[in-house]
Amino acid sequence: MQLSFRISAFFIASLATLSSLAQEPKIIEIRKAGGSTQDQEAFPGANILFKNEETRVLLFHEGALIESDLAYFYSKDNYFKAVGNVIFTQGDSLKMTCKTIEYDGKTQITLADGDVFLKRPDMSLTTEKLNLDRIRNEAFYNTKGVIVDSASTLTSNLGRYYMDQKKYRFTSNVTIDNPDYQVNSDQLDYYTELNQAYLFGNSRIEGDAYTIECERGFYDLDREKGVFKKNATLYYDNKIIRGDSLYFESEKDYAAATKNVSIVDSLNNSVIIGHYGEIFKARDSAIITRRALAINIIDQDSLFIHADTLVATGPEERRILRAYYDVRILKSDLRGRSDSLYLDESIGLTKLLNKPLTKQQEQVFTEADRNKNNPVLWFDKSQMSGNEVLLISDTETNKLDSLKINGNVFIIEKDTLSSDGFNQIKGGVLDGAFKEGKLDNIVITKNTEMVYYLYNDDDLQLIGIDKTTCSALSMNFLDGEINDITFLVAPTGDVYPEEELPKNDRTLKGFVWRKEERPETLNDLFDENDKEEQFPENLNFKYPEIEPLEKKN
């Protein structure tokens, strides 16, 4: 029993000794040299190896072969410094040339200096100084580096190459040059096999037909597509697109943006904003929704148009804006509501349309219901509505030129001197003209009816209520109010004393006062239906968390 115990103890101790020996770093081997010498005063502890005419210095360690003209080998420290036309090879996977190399056999860290050129099957790296960690399989440089792979040339002032992951991390003046695009960034992670990049800091991508700027982004360089965040801007198809998140795909001529989105069209002097937008270059179209708002400049004044969805289509010289569902308009001297809108700036036409009625609505709607469904405009104190409303601008001066309303024309003004009186004009067609951007006069034709409160000019006492029908009439405006009315065809009607005209007869059939719909401020253009959330998955992209690239010597 005692002998057996001693043998077992000896065996275990021997295994422990072998294990510890196996974990110790291997000693650097001297494979070849033309000769050797020592200079203890200048290089204490070093074996100085040098070449001759036939043989260069060859050192080997852990699969790496280092060839040079001269080497200072410190066997005690398992360290050497190789000088002169140095060639470092590691199997078939890596070859590096430089002027000098310092190599530590314990840590397997290589410090290459002077015209460093590293070559692998998938890339090459040129720099002045390079740290190579063979255990971690990483290379680091803090001098300007140039990397060339099959598709691109990459330059930066500071970089790390993770060989196992085939990934670079670059900082400081990072540039990727490719025949199809150029990428500039403060910091960039680049995956060589996938040809994909993560951008950090001020970044810019310039393609043949687009430019992207951001402070955070992901870009697939093969497919020229990516997601970009933080001050993201896309210059595309003569538009400037901004958003908290941008998605872009060059091959499909497509871009999308979410939250705080703006599409600026400088040629047409317009801006569309919202919280979700899509751009289709091939179809010359842009769609924006979620608090969508178009801003157009008319007569040096901003025209705001809000709708559930805004669609801009057509080439730059004839851009057309369409607005769908619950359109609201705001201008300093104009307000409006409609179901949909069509705007063609090239011919100066803005068209407001009603929502088509269903068959059931056609049967049950009263005339007032129909009028409430119609588009409506407010010019100062006048409310005007009809089946279709057309505003025409002078394309040279960009001032409002004329107004046309087709079908079920209704004009209403609150009578300022009575508590519940309204001046009203009803007809089939309205034609109006503007003067210096202000509504100046209109003509109403076809089955025209009128209710109008008449006052004495001297003491402003009510004379009576004029209730008249005729084939046509004209009126002009002063200070935003109806000033004068002229009947163009012999009228039929009378002026009734207030007490002789019942209240029910003081409004025309189909009368609807829509003051509560009139937007007065920008906030009035929106309601609880204008929400921001629920965006497509391609814009919910999450970026990897990274630590800043540290500087290593």
Image: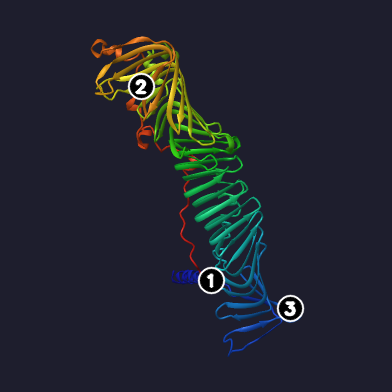
**CA–CA distance between discs 1 and 3?**
28 Å
Element carrying mark 1: loop
Given residues 91 and 505, the one toward you in this image is 505
For residue 165, above or below residue 262: below
Q: Earlier in the sequence, mark 1 or mark 3?
A: 3
Coordinates of residue 335 in the picture (x, y in percent): 39, 30
Instruction: Name which residue type carries label 1.
Output: Thr
Q: In the image, what residue occupies the spot 33% across and 10% down?
A: 494
Among all residues in the image, which is located at the extreme right?
54
Coordinates of residue 268 in the picture (x, y in percent): 53, 39
Q: Which of marks 2 and 3 is in front?
A: 2
Residue bearing the label numbered 2? 412
Instruction: Name which residue type carries label 3.
Output: Thr
Tag 2–tag 3 contact (CB < 8 Å): no
Instruction: Name which residue type carries label 2.
Output: Ile
For residue 531, above or below residue 367: below
Q: Earlier in the sequence, mark 2 or mark 3?
A: 3
Residue bearing the label numbered 3? 55
- Looking at the rendering, which quadrant does residue 135 occupy? bottom right
Among all residues in the image, which is located at the extreme top?
492
Q: Nearer the viewer, mark 2 or mark 1?
A: 2
Element carrying mark 2: strand
Q: Earlier in the sequence, mark 2 or mark 1?
A: 1
Residue 107, disc: 1
- Looking at the rendering, which quadrant does residue 150 occupy? bottom right
